[in-house]
Amino acid sequence: MTHAARTLRRPVAANTYADAAVVLFDGTPMFASKQVMREQYGKLFTDSPHLQLTVASRMEAGDFVVDEEHVTGVRFEGLPTEMTALSIYRVADGKIARLMLLF
């Protein structure tokens, strides 16, 4: 298991992300700052008490980790309640530096 993959095994929290982390949805930045990220993820977790994510497959290459994720129980405006997502992580210095979400 690469260092990047070990980083992703920790529980996801704001401190898992680098201070200047970039999170993209279909190529578009999702959050203006780490504080906005905390607020949006907080709302998602509060509004989705049955949220579950299963990593169906994982591929690792250097600082990159690509996950195929199956997500259920989503309650967030504009998102389906169930989806399959592709998450592409770049890890630097033990933190997520970049995340691209595709679903």
Image (cartoon, grey):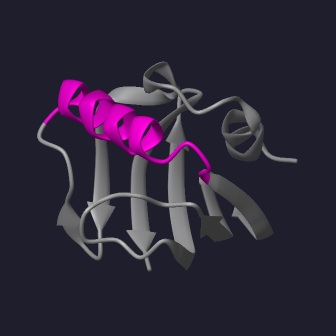
Q: Is residue 102 above or below residue 38?
A: below
**Residue 36 placement (x, y as % from top left):** 19, 33
**Residue 8 placement (x, y as % from top left):** 67, 41
Residue at left 39%, top 50%? Answer: 98
Q: Quadrant of residue 70?
A: bottom right
Residue 48 makes an appearance in the image: yes
Q: Quadrant of residue 28?
A: bottom left
Residue 45 among magenta residues: yes
What is the tally of numbered marks visible in this picture? 0
Q: Quadrant of the C terminus?
A: bottom left
In the image, which residues are magenta? 33-51
Q: Is residue 42 above or below residue 101?
A: above
Q: Nearer the viewer, residue 53 or 97?
A: 53
Q: Nearer the viewer, residue 58 or 85?
A: 85
Residue at left 40%, top 43%? Answer: 47
Residue 62 makes an appearance in the image: no
Magenta-colored segment: predominant secondary structure: helix
Q: Decide if residue 34 is on the left or right side of residue 95.
A: left
Q: Nearer the viewer, residue 76 or 36?
A: 76
Task: Spot the residue most to the top.
Answer: 15
Residue at left 21%, top 54%? Answer: 30
**Residue 14 placement (x, y as % from top left):** 43, 24
Residue 50 among magenta residues: yes
**Residue 61 placement (x, y as % from top left):** 70, 63
